[in-house]
Image (cartoon, rainbow, N blue to C red):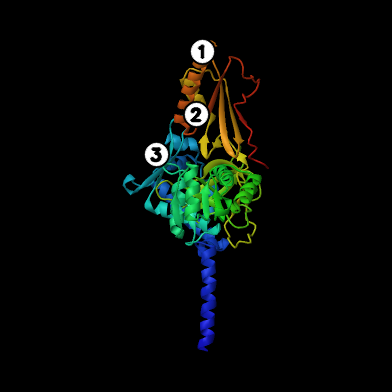
Amino acid sequence: MKSQQRMVFITLTERKHSIMERYYQPEIECASPEQIREWQSERLVKQVRNVWDNVPLYRERMEAAGLTPDDIKGVDDLKKLPFITKDDLRDAYPYGLLARPLSECVRIQSTSGTTGRRVVAFYTQHDIDLWEDCCARAIVAAGGSKEDVCHVSYGYGLFTGGPGLNGGSHKVGCLTLPMSSGNTDRQIQFMTDLGTTILCCTPSYAAYLAESIIERGLRDQIRLKAGIFGAEAWTEEMRHDIEEKLGIKAFDIYGLTEISGPGVSFECSEQKGMHVNEDHFIAEVINPKTGEVLPDGEKGELVFTSITKEAFPLMRYRTRDICILSREKCSCGRTHVRMTKPLGRADDMLIVKGVNVFPSQIETVLMNKGYPANYQIIVDRVNNSDTIEVQVEMTPEMFSDSLSEVSAREKELIAALKAMLGIFAKVKLVNPKAITRSEGKAVRVIDKRNLYQG
């Protein structure tokens, strides 16, 4: 009898150990749909009361819609609430959407702004803990454990990529290499010397690292098994190319600074969409023109509601990303809804090298420097790295046959754009009237990357 009991105990222990390796928080990631919905309803009601009491903008919007917190009794009532947009966040800069006293906030993260006014997101320690849990789930879903060496090559500082995956890696117990971006020689040296097994960075940088490793003849010295890539759009063809060159499985991860950062959703081993962490975020897809909520399986604009964030909770935030939600059962065992890769944008924002770039940012720089609003932005991907070129017409007064004078003007604009965008943009000054005019809407952006399909 004692022997039988011991065998059962070992079996259950081994099974539990296996589950813990597969999921970071199995009781949450594999919860029943009914349990997830119960969590969401309970937390939504509490969050609505929180923003009503502590964020004047939400209270004003709800009152304008004839709503009080008592009208929101669960997830079914979410559609009654008004939307929040990035313009609202900019207008509220810096403290207008804070739901906690500043003394309770321990960190900010930020995105670039279109006209110098940035979006700043605030975090309590509780917010950071939950965010890191979400990133830990992504790392474990990619096969990560405390036995792994996690190499984080996302940018650190105000950008959320580095801090998010860094914290998630700590939660899992990986040996974490906080490399940040750039200095490829050092990246490869640490990969080989320390035996990196999981790489976290943008897909374009992963592709560049792969080429650099192969060029150096170091492919046999790389121990990578998985990559967690996000912050910019990438095709399935690019995924397969990276997987083949590095000998890994490449996982997608999605996030927004406004919501928390990377880890809002992540891919599992099936690689058939990213599981949204529904215990923290409610996802909707709407018709971008009418605001109507669309059923699962239809393509539309992705909207998120933060139901656990304390300092900076966003309600029905319009991401402008176009995607599809699916609740089809996933063979990985996770029960949270899946979203496709973003299939496009509902606005004109570009993502270049993982950085949000708006044509209006570029136009602001040009106009401030005395150039006409006749320009084109050409985005391309060369050797798996994003490039951006701004072609700008000179005024007749600026036009000169002197190459040195034109070159000096180009360098001045390159520096101004770098200060605004945070990335290098090539500038090419062209003759007056050289850029084709349009009788309709001006074609400001030419994106040659062919990133979005479907």
Tag 2 or tag 3, which sits nearer the N-term? 3
Q: Which of the two residues, 101 or 254, is positioned nearer the viewer here?
A: 254
Crowding near the residue tagged with mark 2, few <14, some 14–19, many ≥20 C-alpha atoms within 10 Å: some
Asked whether, in this view, residue 344 is left or right of residue 406, the answer is right
Which residue is the site of mark 3?
A: 96
Which residue is the site of mark 1?
A: 398
Labels 3 & 2 near each other (Cβ < 8 A):
no
Residue at x 66%, y 20% (from the top left corner): 439
Secondary structure beneath dot 2 equals: helix
Tag 2 or tag 1, which sits nearer the N-term? 2
Q: Amino acid at mark 3?
A: Gly
Q: Residue furthest bottom?
A: 1
Q: Amino acid at mark 1?
A: Met
Tag 3 or tag 1, which sits nearer the N-term? 3
Residue 205, how many percent across, how many down?
Answer: 54, 43
Crowding near the residue tagged with mark 1, few <14, some 14–19, many ≥20 C-alpha atoms within 10 Å: some
